[in-house]
Image: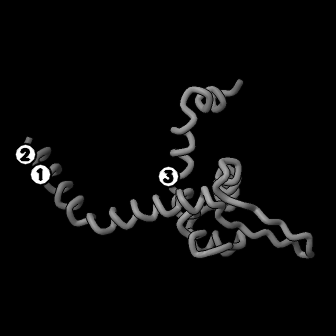
Amino acid sequence: MSSNHSAEALCPYRLVLEHITSRWGVLVLIELLDGPRRFGELRRAVGRVSEKMLTQTLQTLERDGMVHRDAKPVIPPRVDYSLTELGREAAVQVRALGAWTHERMEDVRQARARYDAAREAG
């Protein structure tokens, strides 16, 4: 049994939380709230993510039931990614957290400045 599977058995919700709130997981979920996207569209929208990392993120979110992968049997192959109902619920939550962070960024900046000043003062 790999360490990943043992961690999953011990605390399954924490692992799912990590997937949803990972750097790329959050961005993929929020982007898919606007509707289905192809891989290339997602990669451009998310920005600065490697093909490998985006593939891993999508596979993980698909395994967790958050993302649906629709492969069309055409040439060239067409694959669309969309949110499941579960994924839509998660995406709404992380989008709200992102909005809150954006709204409160000035407070965070001020807290950091106070912290840094106190540390420098010794």
On screen, residue 78 above or below 6: below
Question: Does the CB distance between marks 1 and 2 fall below 8 Å?
Answer: yes
Q: Of the residues shown, which amino acid type is indicated by label 2?
A: Ala
- What whole-number distance in Å separates the C-alpha atoms at marks 3 and 2? 35 Å
- For the C terminus, give its image quadrant: top left
Q: Residue at x 70, y 48 (%)?
A: 63
State the mark number for residue 104: none
Question: Does the CB distance between marks 3 and 1 fall below 8 Å?
Answer: no
Q: Earlier in the sequence, mark 3 or mark 2?
A: 3
Closest to the observer, 47 or 19: 19
- Residue pointed to by mark 2: 121
Closest to the observer, 115 or 88: 88
Q: Judge from the rendering whether residue 1 lies leftward or rightward of residue 114; answer left or right.
A: right
On screen, residue 93 above or below 5: below
On screen, residue 39 above or below 89: below
Q: Of the residues shown, which amino acid type is indicated by label 3?
A: Thr
**Coloured how?**
one colour
- For the N terminus, give its image quadrant: top right
Q: Of the residues shown, which amino acid type is indicated by label 1?
A: Ala
- What whole-number distance in Å separates the C-alpha atoms at marks 1 and 2? 6 Å
- Residue pointed to by mark 3: 21
Percent position of residue 77, x then y = 87, 71
